[in-house]
Image (tube, rainbow, N blue to C red):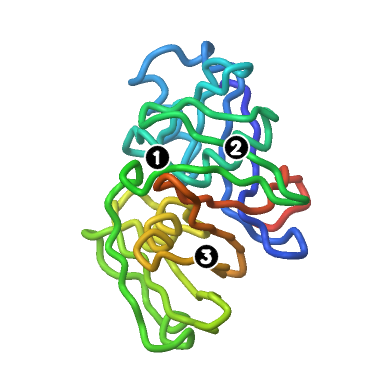
């Protein structure tokens, strides 16, 4: 198997949780789209990134079944790992900045894949949801503290590819932030955390903490 690293992106305040991301630093080791798709399917993470130019930040993103022009947690993870100030994706150039322990990317809502944003009356309702049948990509959310911009969310990709629930989803957070037109702090999944901000020029920032997955980490 080709060498790769595993990161946890959008970790909680104590470094826990986060969405696992496979990163193939040497994208040339998996040269074509079909081989990359097969490798991403073999790894089985919600997304896998292939780095085609580490100095320029050129990346290529795959789910187990789809190639994506842009996705949030792969961009945040790759930016953290490569230490670059921008990424080049098929959707466009993604700005990168670092703020304390957070790595933040700036992107446009139009780059994000379509998501069904479904609001619930309370965080408890979101917590109680069962995984829906495959079909729509659903981002379920509710206010935890609306004046403070705090949101509880869960994500259900609905692709039927073995990823029933996505632990932390940057693209959906970007879409929600753009739709509400306000900065947010989102707790998703088991306790992952995403921070977002509306920026000038139609950009939205999405950021979080990134850690390497260690052998001792719980899945």
Label number found at residue 189: none
Task: Label 3: state its secondary structure.
Answer: loop
Q: Position of residue 144 (x, y in %)?
A: 53, 83
Most distant residue in the left direction = 135
Residue position marked by numbered label 1 in the rendering: 63
Label number found at residue 183: 3
Task: Label 1: state its secondary structure.
Answer: loop
Residue position marked by numbered label 2 in the rendering: 96
First along the sequence among labels 1 and 2: 1
Snapshot quadrant of residue 164: bottom left
Task: Tell me how far mark 1 sits from mark 3, CA to CA.
Answer: 28 Å
The answer to which of 56 and 17 lies nearer the viewer is 56
Left or right of residue 63, residue 49 in this image: right
Residue at the location (47% across, 49% down)?
200
Left or right of residue 41, residue 75 in this image: right
Check the image and report above or below for 143 versus 136. below
């Amino acid at each position: 198997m080709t060498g790769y690293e595993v990161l946890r992106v959008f970790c909680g305040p104590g470094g826990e949780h986060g969405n696992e991301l496979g990163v193939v630093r040497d994208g040339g080791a998996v040269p074509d789209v079909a081989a990359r798709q097969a490798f991403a399917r073999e790894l089985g993470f919600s997304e896998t990134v292939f780095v085609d130019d580490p100095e320029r930040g050129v990346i290529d993103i795959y789910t187990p079944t789809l190639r994506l022009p842009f996705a949030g947690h792969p961009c945040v993870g790759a930016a953290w790992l490569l230490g670059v100030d921008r990424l080049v994706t098929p959707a466009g150039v993604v700005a990168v900045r670092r703020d304390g322990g957070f790595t933040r990317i700036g992107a446009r809502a139009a780059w994000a894949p379509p998501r069904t944003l479904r609001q619930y009356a309370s965080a408890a309702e979101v917590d109680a949801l069962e995984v829906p049948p495959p079909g729509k990509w659903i981002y379920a959310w509710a206010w935890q503290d609306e004046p403070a911009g705090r949101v509880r969310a869960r994500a259900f990709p609905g692709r039927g590819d073995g990823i029933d629930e996505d632990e932390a989803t940057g693209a959906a957070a970007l879409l929600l932030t753009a739709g509400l037109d306000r900065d947010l702090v989102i707790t998703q999944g088991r306790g992952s955390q995403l921070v977002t901000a509306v920026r000038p020029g139609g950009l939205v920032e999405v950021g979080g903490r990134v850690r390497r997955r260690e052998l001792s980490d719980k899945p």
